[in-house]
Amino acid sequence: LMQPSQNRASRTFMDYNSINHALDGICGLYERKIRDINPMGNITYDISDLYNFIDGLADISALVYDHSIQAFLPYDRQWIKQKLLQHLKKLAQR
């Protein structure tokens, strides 16, 4: 779930099959923003840039399905940032 601006009409959601796909989706959103700002340049960023992007959103959270209780559990901005760091570290090790 994401609200990019203070305008409530900007609320939207994206649906992914896994947490990793959702994390890739968040990185993709940031990369599109970079492309919009600098369409001819290379896309490079570090984790602090990504964190600043996430912190700049009016709201962001994740609803993750837990099979053991057959319900969606809500996770906040900090959880998303922690998962992004772990995800990107794993990708960098490949």
Image (spheres, rainbow, N blue to C red):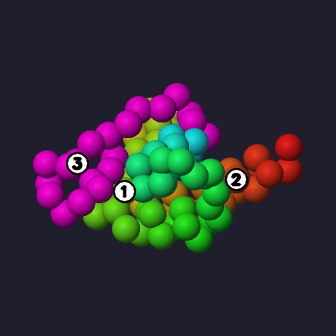
Of labels 2 and 3, earlier in sequence is 3
Q: Nearer the viewer, residue 24 or 72?
A: 24
- From the viewer's perspective, tell me whether residue 37 is left or right of residue 10: right
Amino acid tagged 3: Arg
- Label 3 element class: loop
Tell me the residue at 27%/54% (across/down). Answer: 3
Q: Position of residue 57 (x, y in %)?
A: 34, 62
Tell me the residue at 41%/69% (across/down). Answer: 55
- Label 2 element class: helix
Q: Report how far apart the C-alphas of labels 3 and 1 lie in the structure.
A: 9 Å
Amino acid tagged 2: Leu
**Numbered mark located on residue 90 in the image:** none
- Label 1 element class: strand
Residue of label 3: 11
Of labels 3 and 1, earlier in sequence is 3
Res. 73 in view: no
Q: Nearer the viewer, residue 45 or 9?
A: 45
What residue occupies the far top of the structure in this picture? Answer: 17
Tell me the residue at 86%/43% (across/down). Answer: 94
Amino acid tagged 1: Ile
- The magenta region covers 1-21
Q: Report how far apart the C-alphas of labels 2 and 3 lie in the structure.
A: 26 Å
Q: Is residue 94 magenta?
A: no
Residue of label 2: 88
- From the viewer's perspective, tell me whether residue 15 is left or right of residue 44: left
Residue of label 1: 60
